[in-house]
Amino acid sequence: GAGVSQSPSNKVTEKGKDVELRCDPISGHTALYWYRQRLGQGLEFLIYFQGNSAPDKSGLPSDRFSAERTGESVSTLTIQRTQQEDSAVYLCASSSGDRAYEQYFGPGTRLTVT
Amino acid sequence: AQSVAQPEDQVNVAEGNPLTVKCTYSVSGNPYLFWYVQYPNRGLQFLLKYITGDNLVKGSYGFEAEFNKSQTSFHLKKPSALVSDSALYFCAVRRTGGFKTIFGAGTRLFVKA
C-alpha cells in the first residue's frame, strides 16, 4: 500500500515569506507527527495529532509555527514569516492509534530559507 | 519529561565485528522504546521496539536490542556488522500513557570493509 507522502519535496523561499507543507498519512492511521531535522542533527518533535483529541503542540518552537489536520487525513504545517533558522528537513510520520505501534515516516520536505 | 541520550556521535567498527550503539532514556512510568535507521538519501525506517516482555528484542536486518530497566538503557547490537549497515541510527522513547515520542540526537555508524 501507499506510504506516507509529503509535498513539496523541496521548497526554497525568501526570508519573511509564509510556507505551507503537506503530509498525507497512511490510510487508517489515526496518529500523525511532525518533526524537524536540522542538517546533521537529530529529530526535533514539533506536534502530534491523535484522532479527535486536542493536538500536542508542545514542540512548536514559536507562534510562527502552526499545524492543522483534517479528521484522520491530510495535515499541513504552516510557517509564517520564515527565518533562516527555519531551514531544515520537515518530516511527517503516521502510526496506528495504539501507542505501542511504530511510526512510518515520509520522505520529508527540505526547506531552505534564503 | 521524556529524554533520550545517545552518548556517541559516531561509532566505527570493522566489517564482521560485533557492534553496539548506546542509548539511555528518562521517562516517567514504563517506556516504549524504539530504534530507527536513516540510510543516506532514504527515509527513516523502523528497526525494532520494546513494549513489554522479554528484555532482548530482535528486529530487522539482524539487529537486536536489550532493555535494561535498572540502567535505563536500550542499546542496539548486531553480532556481525556489514558495510551496508553504515547509516544514522536513532533511539526513541515514548511513555506508555502517551503518543509523544522523543528521539535521540542520532549515532552515525561507519562499518569499514
Image (cartoon, coloured by chain):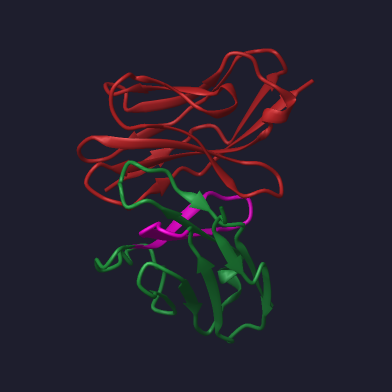
Chain colours: A green, B red
Q: Position of residue A11 (x, y in %)?
A: 67, 74
Q: How many circles with numbers are drawn on the protein?
A: 0
Question: Which residue occupies the foreground of this view, A105 or A28?
Answer: A28
Q: In which quarter of the image is residue B63?
A: top right
Q: Position of residue A70 (x, y in %)?
A: 39, 75
Question: Which residue occupies the foreground of this view, A77 or A12?
Answer: A77
Q: Is residue B50 toward the left or the right of residue A34 in the image?
A: left
Name the residue located 50 percent from the left edge and 27 percent from the top edge. Answer: B59
Name the residue located 37 percent from the left edge and 51 percent from the top edge. Answer: A96
**Relative to residue A31, is residue B102 depicted above or below?**
above
**Relative to residue B87, is residue A34 depicted above or below?**
below
Assess whether residue A96 is covered by the magenta stretch: no
Question: Which residue occupies the foreground of this view, A4 or A47?
Answer: A4
Q: Is residue B43 toward the left or the right of residue A26 in the image?
A: right
**Relative to residue B97, is residue B24 depicted above or below?**
above
Name the residue located 58 percent from the left edge and 86 percent from the top edge. Answer: A16
Q: Give the range drawn in magenta.
A: A27-49
Q: Is residue B85 visible in the rendered structure shown here?
A: yes
Name the residue located 41 percent from the left edge and 60 percent from the top edge. Answer: A32
The quadrant the C terminus of chain A occupies is: bottom right
Q: Where is residue A94 in the image (x, y as percent from the top left)?
A: 44, 56
Direction front: furthest residue:
A1
Assess whether residue A43 is covered by the magenta stretch: yes
Q: Where is residue B92 in the image (x, y as percent from the top left)?
A: 42, 41
Q: Quadrant of residue B72?
A: top left
Q: Is residue A90 visible in the rendered structure shown here?
A: no
Which secondary structure dominates the residues rendered in magenta?
strand
Direction right: furthest residue:
B113
